Image: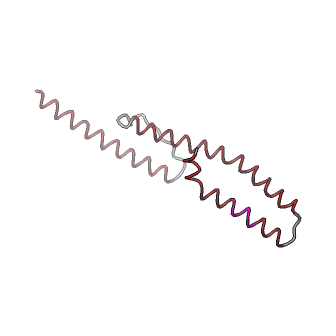
């Protein structure tokens, strides 16, 4: 969970900065404190909806990366989600690496077979 907050500190900090700036502007324009409180409650509500969803997606990606690390030699069966452009780029890189590794493995097996004969 701490890794998630380390990765997302900029986004969360931006949101908190927005709330602080909006609260300051409301106070400077003498808008009642109830409105500032309403803004904070509304922000907290959306935060309580979005953070668990974003954390779930983050945790899923981390599990997939751990699976890749654990089963690096069996990458043919691996299917990665490709919702974003950078995820498609990573998937393409991983596929190229898997193909290169498979060809190296086949070459190694051919060399071993010829050596044993």
Q: Which residues are magenta?
A: 16-21
Relative horizontal placement of residue 107, taking residue 47 as reference (left or right): left
- In the rendered image, the quadrant that contains the N terminus is top right
**Main secondary structure type of the part rendered in magenta:** helix
Rendered residue at 55%/52% (across/down)? 7
Residue reaching furthest bottom? Answer: 28
Question: Where residue 29 sits: x, y (%)?
Answer: 84, 72
Colour mapping used in the image: secondary structure
Question: Where residue 35 sits: x, y (%)?
Answer: 86, 61
Residue 67 lies in the magenta stretch: no
Q: Quadrant of residue 30?
A: bottom right
* Of 89 and 1, the residue lying toward us: 1
Question: Where residue 63 sits: x, y (%)?
Answer: 50, 38
Rendered residue at 39%/49% (across/down)? 93
Rendered residue at 16%/29% (across/down)? 113
Q: Looking at the picture, does residue 47 appear above or below residue 10?
A: above
**Total residue callouts:** 0
């Amino acid at each position: 969970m701490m890794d998630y907050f380390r990765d997302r500190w900029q986004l969360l900090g931006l949101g908190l900065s927005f709330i602080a700036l909006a609260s300051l502007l409301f106070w400077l324009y003498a808008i009642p404190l109830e409105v500032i409180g309403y803004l904070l409650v509304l922000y907290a509500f959306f935060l309580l909806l979005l953070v668990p969803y974003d954390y779930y997606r983050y945790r899923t990606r981390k599990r997939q990366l751990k699976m890749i690390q654990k089963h690096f030699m069996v990458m043919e069966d691996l299917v990665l989600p490709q919702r974003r452009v950078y995820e498609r780029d990573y998937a393409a890189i991983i596929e190229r690496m898997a193909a290169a590794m498979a060809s190296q493995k086949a070459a190694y097996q051919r060399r071993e077979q010829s050596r044993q004969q």
